[in-house]
Amino acid sequence: MVSFTRSWPIAFSLLLAACADPQGSQVRQAVLDGGDLVLDLDLRFTETQMQALEHGIPLRLAVHLGGAAPDVAIDLRYSPLSRQYELALPNDAGTRVFSSRARLLAALDRVVVNDVGAAQGVVRVELVSSALPAPLRLPALIDRDWRLATPPRTWGG
Amino acid sequence: MMLRRLLWLLPILAALVLLVAALWLAADAESARSRLGAAYGWLFGAAAVAVLVLLASIAGELRRLHRERVEGHPGARLNARLAALLGLISVPAALLVAGFAMRFLDAGIDSWFRADLEAAHDAATALGAQVLEREQRVALAGVDALAARVGTAVDGDLQAVLDETLENDSSLIAYLASYDANGTLEALAFSTTAITQPPAPDEALRLQVGESGRIAQTLTLGDTLVVRAVTTATDAFGRSHLLQWLQPLPAELAPQLTLLERSSIDYAQLRFQRGALKTTFVLILGFVTLLALLATLLAALAATRRLTRPIARMAAAAGEIGEGRFGAQIEVESKDELGALTAAFNRMSRDLAELDAREQASRAETEQARAHLAAVLSRLSAGVVSIDRERVLTANAAAAELLDCPIEALIGQPLDQAAAASAASAAVLASIRGRCAEARTEWREELALPGDAPRALLLRAVQLAGGASRYVVIIDDMTVIAQAQREAAWSEVARRLAHEIKNPLTPIQLAAERMQHRFKGKLEPADAQVLDRATQTIVAQVEALKGLVNAFGDYAKPARIDLRPLALDALLNEVLDLYESSGQCRITRTIAAALPPVRGDRERLRQLLVNLLTTAVEAGGHGGAVDAALAQHDGQLELVLRDHGPGLPPQFDGRWFEPYMSTKPKGGGLGLAMVQKIAEEHGGSVRAEQAEGGGARFVLSLPLARGSA
């Protein structure tokens, strides 16, 4: 018989997995490189999310490190005037600018979180609905098109 | 109490939460930036809980109202009706307002996206984009020219090339830099201080440049909008360099382009959020409407409850008054019309209580008077009956006795039914009905009742005030009155006998004795003998007359009796012993043991017993048998003396207890009269009846001494 103290992380992970988005986004790999955590991401945005980005709605992705280190944010933005996409990654001094959405999404495939300060942990990435403009928060709470969350991925250990 | 107050606070708290949630949402929705984003989930959760609390409160109130209505609490129906009425008024109004508000909201939001506005916005955005593209093209041309100079510089001095580029064009305001393949700065030249911290091309940018050869971007560095152009260049020695051209937008364009970009983003966001905006505003309106509805319903229930509470209390108090409990007071809670009504009700209740107290006192007095009257009537020897056309209303014990029926057969009974109780009542009531039919206010009638003991009754009737058909009838037994009159007459006779006859008797006797004494020696023996016999006869008859006169005197004498507790059984045994020892009769005694005493005069009762025994012995003949029995019966001592003689004469009735009624030729006729007189002096009675198996039976009843019953 499995004890509760041993089984609750599994149950919690299963619960988070059930909350994962239907597009199948995932953290393919999480590797500790020195003190940095290198994430190999496969983020699959929905058409609604992309449409929102095209209309200037900033999207924020949160990288949850499960308490091993403070959560970090990834901000995506589109400027209709300059017709370029901006990406603010954790630990970057400035924003990266892309002329196309494909380049932006390609830049999201590999994200490095510097100085996580822990040898092991669980990482997951999700779209932060509370960072959306107010009118979109309620739909984001209930609409599956606004869901983007990867299952948790362990790193280290 | 505290818990109840806290429970009442819950719906108020819930209403406040809903109100805050609605205001919060409204404030946040019109804001472009998210200030409360993280609390959105909690906000909706709290709102849902608040709605549930309000619904639960309303359900609780409705359930309480339903229960009170089913249980018939005073005011519950009125409360329910008022609450339903308020609900019917407020709910459609709130829904109507909400419906119109939603329609206006929808139309209002749609009006933000008019086609002409959208076209103008798109045109402005396109224009801005073209300006930026032009600036980027300029920057690209500049960086291309710079790359060409780097390629032709024979000495490979990058710094000189950069400096020369800026020096050749004094109007050029730019920030130029050269990096190696690893992104390390090689040379730097600038003609502006607006750019303080130029960003170096990162790996991604280097990759992009590697793929497309050159790249142009727009950056915001601090407050400065900058066009960035990056390309690769190979110098004369074949070394590869990455050249970056940073050029601030012209001062006259930068603010407008910044503003245009911001508004362009805002408008694009707004357009995208069109549906969501409607949803949010509908949600806010829904919150407000729900709050208004639930709060109105709850307030309606509470208000009607508060409004009907005095009425409910008044109804309950009225119920108490209806059940005869006067004086109920209700707390006056307000100074409005209901308060005035409550105060008036309290006054009425107090007045009723006072009236009731007075009425009860009056009733008690009436009852007391009625009891007094009943006591008087019960003591009357005359019968008193009140009747109306249909039934006997009241009757006293004497009336029942005179009519030979139980009193229950008279009181409250229909006249026909009461008449059927006895022959006497039939005759009397028939007479009364006949007389009443004549509708006279007062009448009297003598009525003879035939039978074994014929009686004459005197009926006197008076019409009662306030009821033409009601009469009170007084019934007197004329037989008793006649007897009393006879007794009075006999007393007068006895008194006169004692006075008129007894006085001459002594001189007669003395004269006869003197005559005998004087002529006894002077007459012939034969004459003397005659004289002697005559004298003896005179003396004897005078003695007899004296005895008779004394007896009458005793009968007529007013009773002077000394009543004391007396053991009747001992006195009886004493008298019986006397008779038994004289051998006049044989006596059989049946005397109960431990009999209580009677209250009587020993000498008078001894005379009574002697008279009774004498009567019995004389009836049975010398040496005859007499049965004596003494026992307690119905609170009295009952003495039964039975002789075995010829029995009572056929015409024997009550008159045989009057003086001068005797079956004996020599009797004075005072024996039984004295017996009856002495018995009545002691509150008792005597009666005579035929004994079974022959002979007569005298029954004497005497009441027990007080405390012995």
Image (tube, coloured by chain):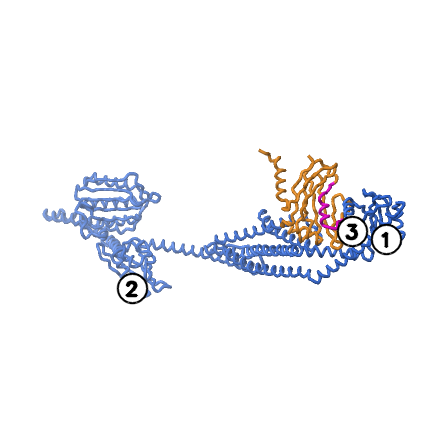
Chain colours: A orange, B blue
Q: CA distance from mark 3 to mark 2?
A: 138 Å
> Which amino acid does the dot numbered 1 rest on?
Ile
First in sequence, mark 1 or 3: give its number.
1
Mark seen at residue B217: 3
Label 1: which secondary element: loop
> Mark 2: few, some, or many residues within 10 Å (few <14, many ≥20)?
some
- The residue depicted at 81 percent of the width and 57 percent of the height is B253
Task: Respond whether the residues carrying marks 1 and 3 are from the same subunit.
Answer: yes
Quadrant occupied by the C terminus of chain B: top left
Q: Which residues are magenta?
A: A97-113
> Which amino acid does the dot numbered 3 rest on?
Gln
Task: Respond whether the residues carrying marks 3 and 2 are from the same subunit.
Answer: yes
- The residue depicted at 59 percent of the width and 56 percent of the height is B293
In depth, the one of B381 and B437 nearer the eye is B437
> Mark 1: few, some, or many residues within 10 Å (few <14, many ≥20)?
some
Q: Is A107 inside the magenta-drawn segment?
A: yes
Direction from residue B695 to residue B43 in the image, left or right:
right
Mark seen at residue B173: 1
In depth, the one of B694 and B289 nearer the eye is B289
> Mark 3: few, some, or many residues within 10 Å (few <14, many ≥20)?
many
Label 2: which secondary element: helix
Mark seen at residue B435: 2
Mark seen at residue B353: none
